[in-house]
Image: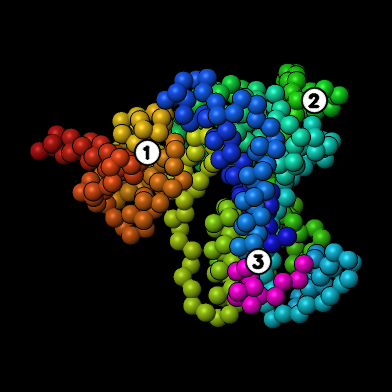
Amino acid sequence: MVGGVSLHTGTVPSKTLREAVLYLTGLTQRDLYGQSYRLKEEITVADLTARTQHVVGREVDVVRSQLSRNRVALYPGTGRFVDDHTVAVTDPTGQEQLLTARHIVIATGTRPARPASVEFDERTIMDSDSILNMERVPRSMVIVGAGVIGIEYASMFAALGSKVTVVESREGMLDFCDVEIVEALKYRLRDLAVTFRFGETVAAVERHPRGALTILESGKKIPADAVMYSAGRQGLTDALDLDKAGLTADRRGRIAVDEHYRTAVPHIYAVGDVIGFPALAATSMEQGRNAAYHACEEPVNPIHDLQPIGIYSIPEISFIGRTEDQLTDEKVPFEVGVSRYRELARGQIVGDAHGMLKLLVSPEDRRLLGVHCFGTGATELIHIGQAVMGCGGTVDYLVDAVFNYPTFAESYKVAALDATNKMREVDHLRE
């Protein structure tokens, strides 16, 4: 299947599912129409998957069309190395074909990691792949792992009305994000009846006819209709016969590469999730483009250090640059400018009173050090900050810029004014 994990089990289906959940539950409209507002009373899995299958089908067509238009030959099947220039492809009928090439790019992606001690049955105990094929919306659910995928699904099922418990062995979640933003998300999820069990480890999961019992090492027992494991990802390299090409993978199935995405064998490249962090669809595409340019000896700029991170929780989170904690640890002075959606006309119009945008500004040269956003449209909104930071702009540009009204984008102007007012107070005291 063309499109990989991103198109079939990851980014596209999960984000489409999220959109269907938001639409059918009417969750985002409840500030306007009351807490009992719902677009559809009984939401079935068929309601959710119909939209997902439609979008995935359309996107597969787009990818196939682009490959065909650019005269890319497609060989469906499973590939493995015969030597460092040859790949054997076994097609669905079992026929094997040898392909030789001067350069090879490995872009096999990842699969959900599965603890050996857990009996996955794809119905009661699932991972992030099999959750897309569930038979019904569970009334209660345990999600093991509070990483990005775990939190995205926790917020989706909580919005659907499932009673969700998140179990995480660490003392917190999304520790690479801004602390204030994570606190805001936790508050909203608790409001949707999500229970967090931080600092807890799962000792066992028992399968029963009417659900599953999750037993924690602390002795707690959590009954639920379903359990979803979100325990990281494993590189899809075990069937590639890497050793025949002179390559190895680490215990998580990942392949090491240099700044040009070359492996230890210089004419073999690796890109995407199979090389590890940041493992995003957007960065994977850029890595593939860079590898192709380098292999064909075409000039190419390296990928920009400034990369936005988007988390499609409900509400969504997005940020670029450094966090307050990172700047404090690095002893970099900064001022904070905050804009709250409830103060924006656009926030009132769409019924989002919880969102916020935060700018971290250097008082020395007035440049943006970080932008952190929580709420409706955060993953879109972040690109304004990315453009300003990427072009070396200052907070003064945002103060002087005219934004469409009413929009969420004008939160940049409000936050910029907040930051400059604070910096002005410091300057006045020194006069």
Question: Which residue is denoted by mark 2 in the rendering?
Answer: 212
Which amino acid type is marked by label 2? Ala
Task: Please give left or right for residue 276 compared with residue 202 in the image.
Answer: left
Label 2 and label 1: CA atoms lie apart by 40 Å
The N terminus, quarter of image: bottom right
| Residue 354, picture quadrant | top left
- Mark carried by residue 270: none
Q: Residues within 10 Å of mark 2 (few under 14, many from 20)?
A: many
Disc on the earlier residue, 3 or 2: 3
Q: State the mark number for residue 357.
A: 1
Residue flagged by tag 3: what amino acid is it? Arg
**Of the residues under marks 2 and 1, which one precedes in the sequence?**
2
Residue under pointer 3: 64
Residue shown at the point (80%, 58%) measured from the top left? 238
Circles 3 and 1, Cβ within 8 Å, touching? The answer is no
**Circle 1 — which element?**
strand
